[in-house]
Amino acid sequence: MAPTLRFVLCGSVDDGKSTLIGRILYDCRQVSADQMQRVEEDSRRYGTQGGAPDLALLMDGLQDERRQGITIDVAYRGFRTPRRCFIVADAPGHEQYTRNMATGASTADAAVVMVDARKGILPQTTRHTRIVAMFGVRHIVLAVNKMDLVAWDRGTFETIDAAYRTVAEEMGLAQVASFPVSALSGDNVTRRCAHTPWYGGPRLLEHLEALETEPPAARQPFRMPVQYVNRPNPDFRGYCGRIVAGDVSPGDRVRVSPAGTAAEVESIVVWQGTRDSATRDDSVTLTLKPDVAVSRGDVIVAAHDPLEAADQYRARLLWMGDQPMTVGRPYRLKLHTHEVGATVTRIRHRVDVDDGSELAAAQLELNDLGVVNLATNRPIPFAPFDESRELGGFILIDRATNATVGAGTITYSLMRAANVKWQDFDITGEVRADLKRQRARCLWLTGLSASGKSTVANLLERHLVNEGRHTYLLDGDNVRHGLNRDLGFTEADRVENIRRVAEVARLMVDAGLIVIVSFISPFQSERDFARSLFDKDEFMEIFVDASVETCARRDPKGLYAKAKRGEIRNFTGVDSPYERPERPDLRLDTEKLSPEACVELVIERLA
Amino acid sequence: MLHSIGKDSAVLLHLARKAFWPGPPPMPLLHVDTTWKFRDMIAFRDRMAAEAEIRLIVHTNREGVDAGITPFTHGSDHYTQVMKTVALRQALDAGRYDMILVGARRDEEKSRAKERIFSLRNARHQWDPKAQRPELWHLYNTRLQEGESLRISPLSNWSEADVWYYIAAEGIPIVPLYRAAERPVVERDGQLIMVDDDRMPLAPGEVPTRRRVRFRTLGCYPLTAAVESNADTLDAIIAETLAADHSEREGRLIDHDTEASMERKKREGYF
């Protein structure tokens, strides 16, 4: 039997995707009597077929969907014919659910694209085809549906077929097979159609049964991302993972990427024994000799064909977050088993999903597709997505909400990592701080304008200097006169503002200083980014807390008044949000505490 | 790892043992015991936990027991709510688990078809079908806020037949109740219910008869219907499963209580 075929169904809403699957399930006797009885009951309540069994209801699982008659999330369903097993992802047709569509496409071998014969190619058809192409699906099955409603007209079918092939070719999709069908009746899906003497090809299901997913792969070099380091007892240390390419045998020379350490495979450990070899898709535990350092996220690779590591990439990115993607904002990036901090450093262009044209863009909105430059905090091993889905596909995670906000594919590395090496010098930050008889720190004061940050910062620095400490104060307003003179107050500029200040603070802490940063820094993700630059005990997030009403009343610079009159825009607390720190290291309530009392609290914490 | 003692749980436990070999699985096994499971199930559970060298945690909703909640005196809906849903929440809250492995499959029931492999639950264990994280390739986002948890279903894409084939291929031990044997049953509302112990109240004149039956799914014995069968080998069970005209949850009485009952139960924190 051919290997299980995973396919994704796409197309516009109402094109009949759920009906197609319902029909296949029904005709392949994959519907049990009790499920059919349930569908008949549901059909009387929600059905669109005038009380006759609505086969689409077999797929549409959630209550809301049955009421609205649409598919709002991706549903997976397995079924089998005598010739093959299938897993189908039924993807939503509505634009706002494009991200679910991408989810279905990412693990699919093939895509069945549904088009309504009366409507032809719609923007959703093109959009979904583009996502399918981006996520690595190479086989397209075009189902021109509802042919019964155009009297099985050959011209209609051939026009749509030709138009679609033009679209697909432009996206690099060469393998398209087209079918004139009625999902409702099953004509040319599961049964021969009496109305299409002009069509001589196979039925759609026959085609899926015979589809060859992977061309016989050329011998690929061994790659296994490490998921887990297994140390059940002091005598055993093994590296667990699933092989994503190539074969491995004991005695093979390997390297651990990105460090490049060389070793030899000692054994391939599996349940209650060992094996002589393992290949792609096997989940195994490897032991190495010598026992070099390996962590989760490393990739064990063939020594003769090591994997590239980089920290700057060109990538395609589908944005799935409700908040737009902002250049410079720190996100978490997950690629195979590796998780690392990352930022988009530049949007090269946005791709018009309808015609493929390249558009200038300052940010990516929900469902936008773009080509971007991406930077990670440290080099990670990867392969271009075209070579390997497993080593070239990544997701981006929002640092504040933990939502999965982006899905991307690496096109190539920008090779900066290879050229700019981090220089190691003899004198470290610790040596510099010791010389000053202090521990270097970054004290990050965040809070609304007029919450008391500058007052506390000023008093705190005076106190520290009186004690003989070496300090520096980075103040939001002052830095904007120099280093950040080129930045405005849009969200993107505010993100970059904080990034620069955090990097400067890091240099100063490395110089051995106690750095006080007094910045509104309204976004949790930027504050988290700043924290990520420092060692655990070096950074202290201090929330200078006063309500926006109190701050507006204080208003020493008259800024709140101006903002309320609309004379300044994007003013934090008025028309721009302030995200309160969720877990600050210290909270100073300046409505209740005097500046002196606040400073005392900070000093206590430093001791 | 949540453990129901059924065939899916057996497969999940087996996979974990394979993954962490040569060590034992590092996570504990949690069983929510309603006190109405088949006796064979409890004996099997204890034997398998010992063999796997895995820590077994058993939780029962004591307040429910003290209040005299039983599947006979209360409707299956109320009984399930107290002895399963509430009990599960109690056990999860007590353990403060953030990752909970379960043996759920997408083909069991329609609302499960939409659930992610890593399914996010809020602090009250509720599932919001509209706020699911996209799952791309094999990349799972495991980041959590305080109080949130993940229900992880590694068997999501398996079918019932897959489970049986795998049990046969790997020689995984299963509870004997899955195999046909003569057992004492009574017929109620067209369903065959096994009389597993003397707590089962019999109607006047109702006499258990011995019939050759097996179970496609295992739960609380008063709520789990048997099917007449001669399948007492794995091959016979597989043949019967593939030919079956009724889906396996047919034998579970709780699903029929209300429309979309499983989706509702899941929003409330049941699996």
Image (cartoon, coloured by chain):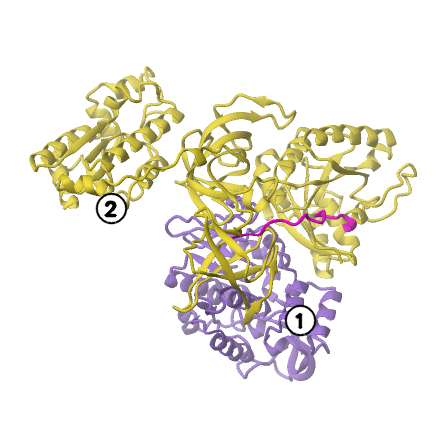
Chain colours: A yellow, B purple
Residue A489 located left or right of residue A157: left
* Label 2: how many Cα within 10 Å (few below 14, some 14–19, many 20+): few
Examine the structure image and report whether residue A198 is included in the region drawn in magenta: no
Q: Chain of mark 1?
A: B
Q: Residue at x 58, y 41 (%)?
A: A100
Q: Residue at x 52, y 57 (%)?
A: A241
Q: Residue furthest left?
A: A466
Q: Nearer the viewer, mark 1 or mark 2?
A: 2
Residue A20 located left or right of residue A229: right
Query: Which of A262/B69 is in front?
Result: A262
* Label 1: how many Cα within 10 Å (few below 14, some 14–19, many 20+): few
Which picture quadrant has residue A295? Answer: bottom left
Res A549 label:
none
Query: Which of A33/A577 is in front?
Result: A577
Q: Position of residue B152 (x, y in %)?
A: 51, 56
Which picture quadrant has residue A454? Answer: top left
Q: What type is the residue that disc 2 sits on?
A: Asp
Res A537 label:
2
From what the image shows, is residue A489 above or below residue A11?
A: above
The magenta segment is A209-225
What residue would you read off at disc 1? B189
